[in-house]
Amino acid sequence: MALEKIILLKLQRSEFAGPVNKQQRSELNAADGPIYSLFETAKHQLNKSASKRFGFFDDNAEHKQLIGLLTNWQSETLDLPAMANKAAEQLQIQLELAETPFTATLLFAQESLLGQNYFYLLWLPTSEIIQVGGELEPYVSESIEPTKLQFALRLHIDEWQSSGSPKYLTQLLNRGSKDLAEAFERFSSFTEGLDLKQQTAEFIDIIESYSADMPEEDSKQFKTQVLDYCVDQDKVGNPVKVDELSEAIDQEAPQKFAEFVVKHQEQPEKEIYTDRSSLKKYMRFSGRDNSLSISFNAERFGSDITYEPASGTLSISQLPKSLRTQLSGYADKKA
């Protein structure tokens, strides 16, 4: 793993509907020390986010200046500092159409990982903090918050240049500030290439079909093992590699599950990107209103938890010990 090049820039709007100001650098930052930790922390946040999307550049987008800048960078017409500054100018133009105040450090980076090359653009929120100097005099400084990553792009450069892959671009949008998110999306020219919910639904159906003839306990164990693997892969930003999963769940017949998956997929894929929220809904049932909250593992449904659709009644025969204690204490007070 190697962080090849990195540069920080800054965009800021101090007041509602005010102008967006840009602070730039003409040279790369050193790619080690605190800035390396900053990059790694922000990248980890991108990898583990359940909101990230996979897609590609829309060549027909109205705003595709970023595509041209990245193309010029790869052809060495522009170096990374020049490309980053021009890209920040294009983002600044889109942000002028928004109104929300913000202060953001933009991190542009090139990384080489296992022989593959990646480009990152990470929007890191920046805030003022008060510190105390050696003479106990408070002073104001700025703090970059990589754990609160708001917007991000990750480009798999090799896939972008060599194939028609629908997933060489990863995007993260924080919808908390709608106008800022819309500005970043216009700037990025991103279009979604994978329907994660549909792909996950198909995979869950395959899991159900594969485990249908297993004894109940074996079926529960198999589903738990597969779903835990899928969630763990998603948290580090990796797809589910079907061959590796198949080997992990059955070392005696390492390709059995993989062959079953390929046979039942509409479009056979050796790697599957999953939607974490869909996986969690499959693993657990949950619901709440103003005065009631219920959540339980799906494996308990039909055994000690049953549902009667006609009356809308949920029956639980094995309550957690802590809940039984609370209920017993409350019943004693009422007696």
Image (cartoon, rainbow, N blue to C red):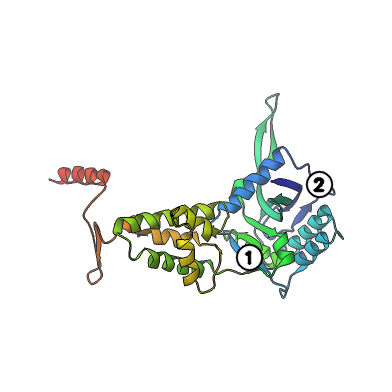
**Could you say whether the residue bearing mark 2 is in a helix, strand or loop?**
loop
**Please, what is the three-letter code of the amino acid marked with disc 2?**
Leu
- Name the quadrant containing residue 140: top right
Q: Which residue is drawn at 45% across and 67% down?
A: 260
Q: Quadrant of residue 65?
A: bottom right
Residue 143 visible within the image? no
x and y percent of residue 153 in the render?
67, 58
In which quadrant is the C terminus drawn? top left
Can you identify the residue that label 1 sits on?
167
Residue 275, position as x, y percentages in the image: 50, 62
Q: Which of 208 and 102 is in front in this view?
A: 208
Residue 318 in sight from this viewpoint: yes
Q: Provide the secondary structure element on which disc 1 rests.
A: loop
Earlier residue among tags 1 and 2 = 2
**Where does label 2 land, which residue?**
28
Give the side of residue 227 with respect to residue 334, left or right. right
Mark 2 burial class by Cα count in 10 Å: few <14, some 14-19, many 20+? some
Looking at the image, residue 46 sits to the left or right of residue 259; the answer is right
| Observer-nearest of 282 and 147 | 282
Q: How far is mark 1 from mark 2, CA to CA?
A: 29 Å
Residue 299: which numbered mark, if any?
Answer: none
**What residue lies at 50% left-to-right and 52% top-to-bottom?**
232
